[in-house]
Image (tube, rainbow, N blue to C red):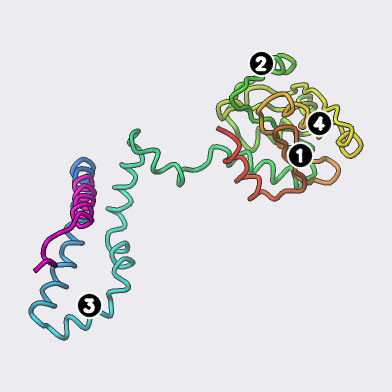
């Protein structure tokens, strides 16, 4: 008879499931989506009834379809599911849970870097972190513009007056262009790299910024952080590094 007496683990298990169901019901009540619950409940009722009543044919069909229930459920209720998740994503208190699927604000930046690499357009892009670069920004031109592929390609076009220098990004916006950066005095780097790369290294020796460099000679992409440079990186690697190294 002891098997019918719930242990501590059973109680905790029940409480966790009850809490999850309770929060789920509250979300559905707030944002709608009862059609999904009704559809899901109907599937379980039919399956349970077929099992209890020993309906062999129905049970056989349901067992065959069992592995595909999730897919069928999504197909049947795709509009309701999309609507529900859209409403949830708009909730400020729940944005943390949807941050992984939110489109990165740096997508235009990565697209521009990829294009500039292909076209062998030299570029120097500084993503500011906690330490502000106000003293360097004063040397350039403040534009405070939204990040866009066309704007970045225009800035670093060697036929424009803005291409010579660095772009500084603050709070996901292009704050300044044509910024003069300090050059690294590291002799090891000075023998291997040109001015653009030395500037990228130099600013990260004095700040916590993350810098992207595109070589005008080779089109290869590099990034610098904490006074160290990583060369010849792929866009996917750069994307992950931006996520890891920036706010």
Q: Is residue 228 left or right of residue 1?
A: right
Picture residue at 67% right of the left edge, 41% below the top:
112
In depth, the one of 5 and 245 nearer the eye is 5
Q: CA distance from mark 2 to mark 3?
A: 66 Å
Label 1 Cα neighbours within 10 Å, binned few <14 / some 14-19 / many ≥20: some
Give the residue at x 32% y 36%. 91
Q: Nearer the viewer, residue 138 or 145?
A: 138
Distance, label 1 to label 3, CA atoms, is 58 Å
Q: Dots 2 and 4: beta carbons under 8 Å?
A: no
Q: Residues within 10 Å of mark 4 (few under 14, many from 20)?
A: few
Q: Is residue 100 left or right of residue 30?
A: right
- Disc 2 target residue: 134
Q: Point out which mark residue 229 bears.
A: 1
Secondary structure mostly taken by the magenta-highlighted segment of the chain: helix
Q: CA distance from mark 4 to mark 3?
A: 67 Å
For residue 212, which numbered disc appears in the image?
Answer: none
Q: Residue furthest right?
A: 191
Q: Sequence order check: which comes first, mark 1 or mark 3?
A: 3
Q: Residue under circle 4?
A: 159
Mark 1 → mark 2, Cα distance in angstroms: 23 Å
Residue 62 circle label: 3
Nearest to the eye among marks 1 and 3: give it: 1
For residue 228, say whether it is visible.
yes
| Local secondary structure at mark 2 | helix
Q: Earlier in the sequence, mark 4 or mark 1?
A: 4
């Amino acid at each position: 008879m002891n098997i019918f007496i719930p242990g501590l683990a059973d109680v905790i298990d029940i409480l966790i499931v009850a809490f999850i169901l309770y929060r789920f019901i509250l979300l559905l009540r707030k944002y709608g989506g009862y059609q999904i619950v009704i559809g899901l409940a109907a599937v379980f009722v039919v399956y349970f009834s077929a099992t209890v009543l020993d309906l062999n044919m129905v049970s056989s069909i349901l067992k065959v379809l069992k592995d595909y229930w999730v897919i069928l459920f999504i197909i049947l209720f795709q509009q309701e599911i999309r609507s529900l998740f859209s409403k949830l994503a708009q909730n400020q208190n729940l944005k943390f849970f949807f941050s992984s699927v939110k489109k990165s604000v740096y997508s235009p930046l990565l697209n521009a870097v990829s294009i500039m690499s292909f076209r062998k357009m030299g570029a120097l892009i500084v993503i500011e972190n906690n330490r502000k670069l106000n003293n360097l920004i004063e040397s350039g031109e403040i534009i405070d513009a939204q990040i866009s592929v066309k704007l970045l390609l225009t800035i670093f076009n060697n036929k424009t007056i803005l291409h010579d220098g660095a772009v500084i990004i603050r709070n996901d916006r292009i704050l300044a262009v044509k910024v003069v950066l300090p050059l690294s005095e590291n002799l090891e780097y000075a023998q291997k790299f040109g001015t653009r790369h030395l500037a990228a290294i130099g600013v990260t020796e004095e700040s916590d910024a993350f810098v992207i460099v595109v070589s005008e000679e080779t089109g290869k992409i590099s990034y610098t952080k904490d006074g160290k440079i990583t060369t010849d990186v792929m866009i996917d690697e750069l994307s992950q590094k931006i996520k890891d190294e920036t706010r």
